[in-house]
Amino acid sequence: MKSPILTWTVLDLPVVRNGSTVLLDNKPWKAVGANVYWLGLDENVTPPAGEPYYAPLHASYPTPGRITQIMSIITALGGTMIRSHTLGVSVGNPLSLWPSPDKANPAAFEPIDWAVYQARVYGLRLMVPLVDNFDYYHGGKYTFLRWAGFNLSRTVDERNPLVQEFYNDPKVVNLFKRYIETLLSHMNPYTNLTYAEDPTIFAIETGNELCGPVWGDMDVPREWVRDIGRFVKGLAPKKLFVDGTYGVNRTHLEAEEVDIFSNHYYPVSTAKLRRDLETLASVDKPYFIGEYGWLGNAASADASLPAWYREIERSSKVMGDTLWSLFGHNVPNCNTFVEHNDGFTMQYGNPAHAAQIKIVRQHLIKMSQDLSISADADLPPVSCPPPTSLGVQPSGQQGSRLF
């Protein structure tokens, strides 16, 4: 297992785009790893008494040890990056970055600061969505709609045409922009960089699985995408900007602000991937597979994991992929894995997942072209608890939470 990267020179370089190729240090770079959606705010663990917990939404902050261990796991897998919803989507409950409009919560920045810093320590990059299409514990577009006076919830109003006001109503759009500015202008005490400045966050995504009133309709106005793209690039000009529409919307292809297009795959499908790449053939921009169900379907050649990976690996336009979704131990409890209830929980170190994790690892190493690690070797162990020497407290602060 390779050691965490501590040379800051490369880490200070931004990831850039040259046509459909993504570069780091003037060399082609692949963004491969996993979705770790809970890095900023979790819903899967009930913390010890006295720790912050919002029971109605099962929300809590992940421990520093859980965050550090997942960085070590991504490194062991041969990954180069993480996509994480709650590093950017955190609105509407008392533990959020914005519990209410324009009211920042300093405590909510603590796990995010640590996650960004630990990614930097391990030489990993981060892709951060700004909003969620849904109405989950970490908030999303319905939260902003309610704040602006639209009494909507996804369980009742998913098909209500008024959900489009998230994109169209100036009050909602300006509220969303102020939230983005709160996020990107925050100074991380571990790095002394704002999130806008820190190249560890290499890409900002409009949102997660964005659509309109009908699921999968891709009804995200092009002008909204362009407007948010201009706003983000005004604050963070060196970030790559990702269209987070759920699917490739042809009307967005000429949006100059968009650097990367993406889609999600449940189940994986080589045929669907080919169709997406055909749609993108007319533009010189890369394609990112933001989520896919890593379990695959061995009974279907179109949906088997090895066939899926072969299709990805042969395409020069696919800049990378992140599986859904990765968990480790419930640190400081090293005897228990964290569970999630969607059927796609990958737990590194769980013998039940070892065979497929090895297939995943071989793919990530092949994509990253990291010659320092062997794709055919046994899965390397990841320590629990993780090494605390890889983390320091920011100046003037003393950590009190369990590692």
Image (cartoon, rainbow, N blue to C red):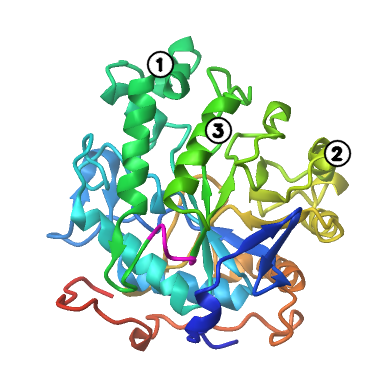
Residue type for callout 2: Glu
Q: Which residue is identified by label 1?
A: 156
Q: Amino acid at mark 3?
A: Val
Judged left or right of residue 308, residue 39 is: left
The quadrant of the rendering that contains the N terminus is bottom right
User: What amino acid does circle 1 point to?
Assistant: Val
Name the front one of labels 3 and 1. Answer: 3
From the viewer's perspective, is 4 left or right of 311? Answer: left
> Of the numbered discs in the image, which one, if any, rests on residue 278?
2
Give the image location of residue 48, x and y in percent. 19, 62
At x 64% / y 80%, what residue is drawn?
379
The vertical placement of 232 against 369, above or below, is above
Please, what secondary structure does the residue beneath circle 2 have?
Answer: helix
Q: Which residue is mark 3?
A: 225
The crowding category of the residue bearing disc 1, from other C-alpha atoms within 10 Å (few below 14, some 14 to 19, many at least 20), is few
Q: Nearer the viewer, residue 158 or 104?
A: 104
Q: Which mark is residue 89?
A: none
Question: What is the C-alpha distance between the residues marked 3 and 1?
Answer: 26 Å
Task: Please provide the residue range marked out in magenta.
Answer: 195-200
C-alpha separation, residue under disc 3 versus residue under disc 2: 22 Å
